[in-house]
């Protein structure tokens, strides 16, 4: 499935690090950043998560919620959140159904090697529940959070 800007974002329900279910539609009325990342506590994923963490106050000022999604289990998410003081929600998509629906799971090419896995990507969802912007492949995890904030400020 391909996520299209201007269309309704597919709803989903996923558990967080404590097992509490989060439904995308519960965030209607807020801007939602859904970012997909491969694995907790790895170099690129840590840079991206810490970038969102460091800009959290600015995202809050824009009435924006950040949801990180990876296939990691809740225990890994809890450890990652505690280790880096992450103030936003990480969701577990162990069966990769949401990642697949959002185009964040599939074939990727890294250094000429084809593999199947998480495609680092982000979907910005407006308060109306529609996709405002879709970064299909995030090239620089470290600088990406600032680009997402900039896009929100232009909404």
Image (spheres, helix red, strand yellow):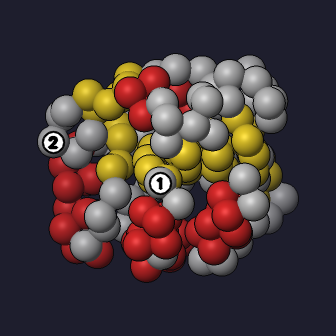
Q: Residue at x 34, y 57 (%)?
A: 88
- Tell me residue 47's x, y (percent): 50, 76
- Tell me residue 124's x, y (percent): 64, 46
**Residue 15 vs residue 7, the one in the foreground:** 7
Tell me if residue 23 comes above or below residue 19 in the rendering: above
In the rendered image, which residue does mark 2 sit on? 18
**Residue 134 vs residue 127, the one in the foreground:** 127
Q: Residue at x 62, y 66 (%)?
A: 149
| Residue 149's disc number | none
Is residue 143 visible in the rendered image? The answer is yes
**Residue 103 vs residue 95, the one in the foreground:** 103
Q: Residue at x 25, y 53 (%)?
A: 76
Judged from the image, the secondary structure of the residue bearing numbered disc 2 is: loop
| Residue 63's disc number | 1
Numbered-mark total: 2
Judged from the image, the secondary structure of the residue bearing numbered disc 1 is: loop
Along the horizontal axis of the image, is 115 left or right of 41?
right
The quadrant holding residue 112 is bottom right
Which quadrant holds the N terminus?
top right
Along the horizontal axis of the image, is 86 left or right of 8?
left
First along the sequence among labels 1 and 2: 2
Along the horizontal axis of the image, is 132 left or right of 123?
right
């Amino acid at each position: 499935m391909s996520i299209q800007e201007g269309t309704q974002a597919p709803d989903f329900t996923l558990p967080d690090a404590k097992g509490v279910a989060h439904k995308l539609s519960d965030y209607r009325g807020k801007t939602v950043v859904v970012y997909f990342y491969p694995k907790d506590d790895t170099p690129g994923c840590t840079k991206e998560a810490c970038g969102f963490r460091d800009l959290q106050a600015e995202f809050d000022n824009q009435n924006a919620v950040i949801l990180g999604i990876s296939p990691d289990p809740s225990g890994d998410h809890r450890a990652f959140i505690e280790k880096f003081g992450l103030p936003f929600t990480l969701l577990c998509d162990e069966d990769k159904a949401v990642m697949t629906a959002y185009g964040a799971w599939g074939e990727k090419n890294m250094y000429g090697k084809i593999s199947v896995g998480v495609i680092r990507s982000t979907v910005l969802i407006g308060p109306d529940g529609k996709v405002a912007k879709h970064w299909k492949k995030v090239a620089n995890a470290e600088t990406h959070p600032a680009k997402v904030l900039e896009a929100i400020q232009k909404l």
